[in-house]
Amino acid sequence: MRILFIASEGLPFSKTGGLADVVEALPKALVASGHEVAVVLPRYRGTQVTATVVRGLAVPMGTATRLVAIAEGGVLHGVRYFFVDDPEYFDREQLYGAAGRDYPDNAERFAEFSRACIELAKSVWVPEVIHCHDWQSALVPVLLRTVHAADPAVRTLPVVFTIHNMGYQGLFPKGVIERIGLPDTLFRPDALEFYAQLNYLKGGLIFSDYLTTVSRKYAEEIQTVEYGCGLEGVVQGRAGRLEGILNGVDYSVWSPENDALIAARYSANDLAGKRTCKKDLLAEFHLPEENLNRPLVGIVSRFVDQKGFDLLAEAAGELLEEDLTLVALGTGEAKYEKMFRELAQSFPGKLAVKVGYDDTLAHKIEAGADMFLMPSRYEPCGLNQIYSLRYGTVPVVRATGGLDDTIEAFDPESGRGTGFKFEEYTGAALLGAVRKALAPFGNQLEWRRLQTSGMAKDFSWRASAAEYAQLYERARTARIEEAASASK
């Protein structure tokens, strides 16, 4: 099958979050199972291309027409890459915004991107199914089922749409609909209107053939008021076309047995290298080597409310009185960056932080830490807890979304389990979970069994890719049947 991925970011070209990991790894897994896959992304600053495939592609945007190019980025791991090239819109310092604010023309940027992707699918690389990701590509199914509804080149082209995070919806003022050239008739409650605003994500939810999200638990959660972010009713209405498919991980990149970025390689059969990695991690953060025998807790995250850092702020004083060391890597809201810096000053030698993103350091934290903390308010899937399992770094997580799906609570009676979970969204519950994790740390045999239980888990993309392939076939069948019915 020929599958076209459309997304706003994807490794190795661009990244702000886990979406980029998925857009790199899932196509690779699909190619490995015999499918033909291409990925189209915006050409951001610094993206190198091999050739320009189309020059001067006319993209209608309201009363104006913009000229963009389609560039090719070559083939990586069997996956072909294309880029929508418009320097005015995409040759910028960051992907979505700067100085903590979204770019004011994001609605236009990603409307143009969606329109250009459809033209690519009509004449440059013709797929059998399109797989769109998050609000930035949500206008693709909207345009296909409305503006292009009678176009024989694409009217039977199915769209699978993946929600990576319901919290990001692409909300814009009503006037945007005219600027991007969508029919006014789409500004209604059963289409793109959302409390007097235009909602891109809502369009993707309504007009796609099938919806997926990145864990089974999250597929259930987004149908509730607590996690639906105002769109729970829309999701409930499409529940028959919604699948929860757990994200996988790429063990060729994230595994202590072949990780070139860590101080020493190790495996479940020989964990000796993990202590070397811990020593290296302490040195990276300029923490005293005397911490080598204390539990070392790692964090790699965006520093935002969603990730539970309000709980950490609530519990930090008591947490850091425990016999442990904590290292954190991330960037995000100024209040949490400030919190970590102040805690590092208040607890010298016990806590260290690096504000920013450093891929090598992220690998070193996974390998060198004893525990990994993810106290998220909600977490559609999460990848770091899965990485942690493979590195023998015991996860401590809140039981939500993919965190709940992937971590089995440790039972000290039976010795079974892979990590520690807490339900209640409070600092006290977080603190209680960490204390439960500290209890078996001093028992070498018990802790090793906990580590190796996690390391034995397999969350590779193979199984998830097979589920997606089956879904693509269902989407093709459904689209052909619906197009035939509409033409009668």
Image (cartoon, rainbow, N blue to C red):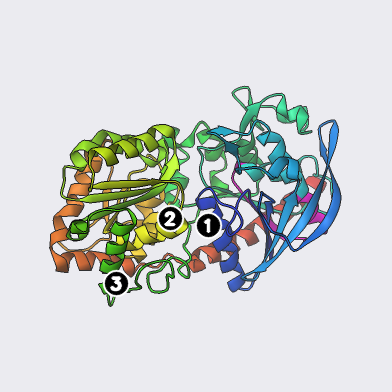
Magenta span includes 95: no
Q: Secondary structure at mark 1?
A: helix
Quick one: label 2, few (<14), some, or many (20+) residues within 10 Å?
Answer: some
Residue 352 lies, in percent from the top left, at 30, 47
Task: Point out the stretch of residues depicted in magenta.
Answer: 117-135
Seen in the image, is 408 located left or right of residue 9?
A: left
Q: Is residue 266 above or below residue 195?
A: below
Of the two numbered discs 1 and 3 on the same chain, state the one appearing first in sequence: 1
According to the image, label 1 marks what residue?
Answer: 21
Report the residue marked by disc 2: 383
What is the residue that sits farthest to the bottom in this orientation? Answer: 269
Check if mark 1's residue and mark 2's residue have beta carbons within 8 Å. Answer: yes
237 horizontally vs 322: left or right: right
Please state if 479 lies on the left or on the right of 249 as rendered: right
Circle 1: residue type: Asp
Residue 374 in the image, given as x and y percentages of width and height? 34, 48
Q: Which element type, helix, strand or loop, lies under badge 3?
A: helix
